[in-house]
Amino acid sequence: MQTRVIHGSRWKPLLMAVGGLLLIWLAVWAIETKAPDWGVWLYGAFGVVLAAVGAIWTLRPSTLTLTDEGFEVRDAVGRRFSARWSWIASLELWHNPAARQALVAWRLRPGAPRTTLGRIDLNLFEIDGALPGLWSMGPQELLETMQTWHSAATARDEGNTPA
């Protein structure tokens, strides 16, 4: 059985962590130079959260594992999600309007198991699910890679050999 592991990007969360540290530094500087108001404390708190999340994602990036049977995503805190290739009808690039970000999304075949979040995604966005961002390859390259694995698995399931 073949396996390919794609790791999350390390430089993007590192930039988040650095940005968080910069916000903390600015908040401390503002507190020392003038009477702090609630906004300064808010910036400092946001900086702490941003630095912590960026550090966690840098030290333990998410992984996407592709196998002959399907794929599994493990995030930085260890949560896992998996789907079988046989459940997926199609893969596509989906543009998240809120984040202005392209993500790899999928549509499930009729009868495939759906999570509660997947049902919400289907009702709101007309997709069944999408991979989170921050991968070591761009969304188009990731989509092409996953489509190759999906096509090979679909051809194998139908008793054909992939082209």
Image (cartoon, rainbow, N blue to C red):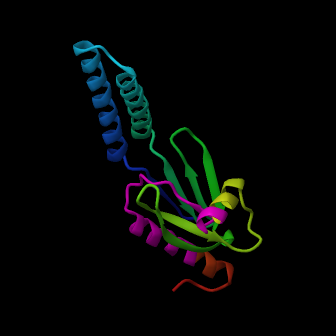
Residue extending farthest to the left is: 33
Q: Is residue 118 left or right of residue 13?
A: right
Residue extending farthest to the right is: 111
129 falls in the magenta region: yes
Q: Is residue 43 left or right of residue 145?
A: left
Q: Identify the residue shown where x is 63% and y is 60%.
A: 121
Q: Closest to the observer: 121 or 43?
A: 43
Say how many tags the image has: 0
Q: Is residue 158 left or right of residue 151?
A: right
Where residue 130 appears, as percent x and y from the top left, is 55, 60
Q: Quadrant of residue 158?
A: bottom right
Where residue 5 appears, as percent x and y from the top left, is 48, 56
Q: In this picture, which residue range is highlighted in magenta?
A: 123-151
Q: Quadrant of residue 122?
A: bottom right
Where residue 75 appears, as percent x and y from the top left, is 53, 45
State which quarter of the image contains the N terminus.
bottom right
Q: Identify the residue shown where x is 56% and y is 77%.
A: 152
Q: Quadrant of residue 31?
A: top left
22 falls in the magenta region: no
Q: Identify the residue shown where x is 55% and y is 83%.
A: 162
Q: Identify the residue shown where x is 27% and y is 30%.
A: 22
Q: Is residue 43 left or right of residue 64?
A: left
